Amino acid sequence: MPFIPVQALSAGVPLLHSDLLTRWPPEQKFVAHIDDALLPTFDGPRVLYTDGFSRQDHSIRAVYYDKPASFSTSLGVIAGPVADAALLQFVAVYLRSSLGRYFLMMRAWKMLCERNALHLKDVANFPFFKPGDSPNPDAAQKALNLVSERLTELSREDELVQAAAYADMKEALDECVFDYFDVTEEERALVRETVDILMPAIRPRSYGSLNTPTQRPALDQDVVMYARTLAAELTNWRKRTKGKGKFDVSVVSSDGSCAGPAGIIRIQFNDQKTEDGSSTTRIDDDAVLETLSELRRLGLSVVPAGEAFWFVPDTFIWSDGAVFVVRSLVRRNWTIRQALRDAERIVRNVQEGQIGKHRVGGSVTGEAAASSSDWQVAFPIRPATEAADAMCESWRILAARQRPGFHPKLREPLLTRALKTHVENVTARARGLLGMWAAESVINTIDDDTAELTEERRTDIVYGWNDDNQSIQMVFEFKKMNAKAKARGEYLGPNGLGRFVTGIYSRGQPVASMVGILLDPFEAVVPPIHQALGQPATMASLNLCACDDGNIYQRPSLIFSVADFDTEHRRAADLAPQCGSIRVAHIFLSFGYAT
């Protein structure tokens, strides 16, 4: 039986040419015990691969072979019946493809931190399925057939020209692998970038090898792709959070040949129209220097390192409703992956209320609060929005007619308990909300020295939710409201809205909600609240912040479509989120009959 030497798999082709096989090594007199179940792996369709790869080519050395041959235990094998020959041909191409190299980087831990080693369990963890189980079965079957046809063509080539022939078809085979797994164009670009730019930077072996593609100057096409990706990803976030508006991303960069080249990214938001984002790029040395000077005035700290070279921290500058980012023109700063990270960071900053706020020592700075709230229209905190919508829907259902357990004469705690139970058991389940609901939840403060509880409050309804990136506790504080000044005073006082300002409600949270239960018509209750908010005494006691248009409240609400207006309040450092203030949405609910 012919023998497959390990070196035969280094030909760089996903097929094993029979000319590369040798005789059984004469010095090998004995073999390990072979179970009968393993005998089929020495004949028929199979994929063989080595347990390592070269530092020059981070690809799995996988080959397809379907004739009788023996091999050493240092080779891994994936075998199957003749009916699976096309699938096994595809596996050999898959393991050598860009997508295969991507999964190798993500799943084979040894190559990242120790050596270029590959184990059977690493390959076993690679995603795979048959065409019928694909998200797009027709496309997967077509890709499988094309790969089989190409490998059949390749098998007819002489061994000396197979490598060149494979190089000519490698890009097309890569596309077939992407098609099989239904990988989007955006995902394909990210995969290629990862294996072409980031993979060569794995475990540098010497000082000279530190000069990887990530450290080299960014190309014009890198900057263009970054800007295009950032605009598209911000748009995707806006759509996912059900926001509105449009983003315009522009990049002005230095000539790459100058000393210390840099690029300045400017993201402008327009809340007047909702459409896909746009991007532009240009090279202008003078504009870069002028903009850097202005950004330094706004708070950008630049550390000089020579006559024309600076160290620039990874800082976002918010000014005049736009965000600026300064990056050196090094390729790692202008990747698709970096654009995706920057987009998420902007979204988190907006949702945490950090835009337009000056934070000494922080990564977000700027001088203009004007237009800052516009960005919150783009990225509403979706779990909070969904909770508010669900709560209002349950109210409409319960308040549609008079019920023994839900009517205007009941005390607030009884109403909120019934409302919480309905929204938790009915509306939230129907809408697929996964957070936790609570009514009359107890919150306390404690003396660190004595361990005594120093304050206790009960919140009416709380919706709690968290994922890997954020955590919210959305508090809804209810007040019965009629047209009398006393009710208005309670609503705006220390036991109402004041609980979110100087009280301990919503500690560290960026948003909350006051809910007025209307016992008189809306026109008789809410406009007087608008007027009362403008009184100097009220503004002072509630630490009210002026809105973009100079008003003391934002109407319509930027937080919830079900709210009438928003107010923003400065809070003490131990109560406030990072931005220093909380935004409260004011919702007013009425019964569906005369009260």
Image: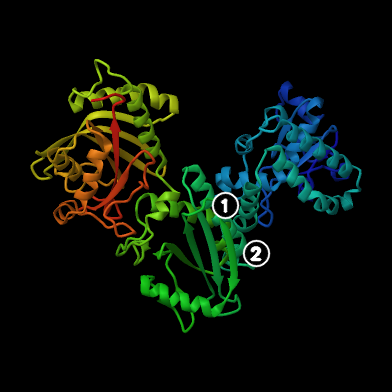
Q: Answer with the quarter of the image where residue 468 lies.
A: top left
Q: Position of residue 446 (x, y in %)?
A: 13, 41
Task: Give the foreground label among 2 and 1.
Answer: 1
Q: Position of residue 220 (x, y in %)?
A: 63, 68
Q: Answer with the quarter of the image where residue 499 lies.
A: top left
Q: Nearer the viewer, residue 18 or 444?
A: 444
Read off the residue under disc 2: 221
Q: Choose the circle earlier in sequence order: 2 or 1.
A: 2
Q: Residues within 10 Å of mark 1 (few under 14, many from 20)?
A: some
**What residue lies at 27% left-to-right and 47% top-to-bottom?**
508
Give me the disc on residue 268.
none
Colour mapping: rainbow
Q: Describe residue 2's horizontal placement relative to residue 534 as left or right.
A: right
Q: Residue furthest top?
A: 404
Q: Position of residue 527 (x, y in %)?
A: 25, 44
Q: Is residue 363 above or below residue 490?
A: below
Give me the disc on residue 276.
1
Helix, strand, or loop for circle 1? loop
Inspect this view and state whether residue 284 appears.
Answer: yes
Helix, strand, or loop for circle 2? helix
Amino acid under label 2? Gln
Q: Residue furthest bottom?
A: 307
**What residue lies at 36% left-to-right and 65% top-to-bottom?**
366
**What residue lies at 34% left-to-right and 49% top-to-bottom?**
555
Q: Quadrant of the C terminus?
A: top left
Q: Nearer the viewer, residue 590 or 496?
A: 590
Amino acid under label 1? Asp
Q: Describe residue 78's horizontal placement relative to residue 248 as left or right.
A: right
Inspect this view and state whether residue 30 appears.
Answer: no
